[in-house]
Amino acid sequence: MDGIIGRKLGMTRLFEEDGRVVPVTVIEAGPCPVLQVHTPVNGRWAVQLGFGQRKPKRSARALAGHAKQAGLEAVPVVLKEFGLTPGTEAAPAPGHVVTVGIFQPGEWIKVTGTSKGRGFQGVVKRHGFSGGPATHGNTRHRKPGSVGPGTDPSRVIKGKRMPGHMGARRHTEVGLKVVKVDTGRNLLFVRGAVPGPMRGILEVRKQGRRSRYA
């Protein structure tokens, strides 16, 4: 397995041997039991992992039966699928538990989550516009300015950066580095920031090599 489900706990800092400060995000990663393994018979190579435990009174009967087939007593709160390389012989079986031990310090990873919702915002905050002059009688301090040509093409061009809903979108941060792995507490310390609020659900995957954007 090259991926796991986790929850963002917050940010802190670690100190290297030479005294340098490293800003890290603490992720509670796993343990994640395997509920289902997809093979070419299903049309794809994938493994379904679960995370957390749902209360019995909040569990649908269909999900309870699905979890029982994998040998689980409680229904996971989150279910996510992670792809496998075609022809993988070491695919985990249902009931197997994936832990944070699959990661090692120094590995490159990518983290996917849902960014914080900011509500309806203007172009200054949403797109980083500089705005208009702040003095000399100007009244267009934070307005977008000209929106579209009047004669040709007489419409607003598609994709124009305008005010609107900001955040609450699925985002993947690439080029992150594992600084520390705490298998006893199922914690993963990742250098830098990851998308989402505290206690937000994350998908952590191995990247294999450093990203050109990092």
Image: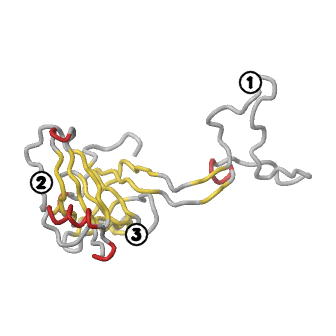
Residue 134, x across and y down, in percent: 82, 54
21 w.r.t. 153: above or below: below
Q: Is residue 135 left or right of residue 145?
A: right
Report the mark closest to the observer, 1 or 3: 1
**Mark 1 lies on residue:** 153
Q: Nearer the viewer, residue 129 or 14?
A: 129
- Neighbour class for label 3 at 10 Å: few (<14), some, many (≥20)? few
Residue 92's disc is: 2
Residue type at mark 3 is Arg
Q: In this view, does 126 lie to the left or right of 140?
A: left
Residue type at mark 1 is Pro
Report the mark closest to the observer, 3 or 2: 2
Q: Do the residues labelled 2 and 1 touch (CB within 8 Å)?
A: no
Q: Are marks 1 and 3 in contact (CB under 8 Å)?
A: no
Residue 199's disc is: 3
- Neighbour class for label 2 at 10 Å: few (<14), some, many (≥20)? some
Q: Is residue 44 visible?
A: yes
Residue 175, x across and y down, in percent: 36, 48
> Residue pushed farthest front?
61
Residue 201's disc is: none
Secondary structure type for disc 2: loop
144 w.r.t. 92: above or below: above
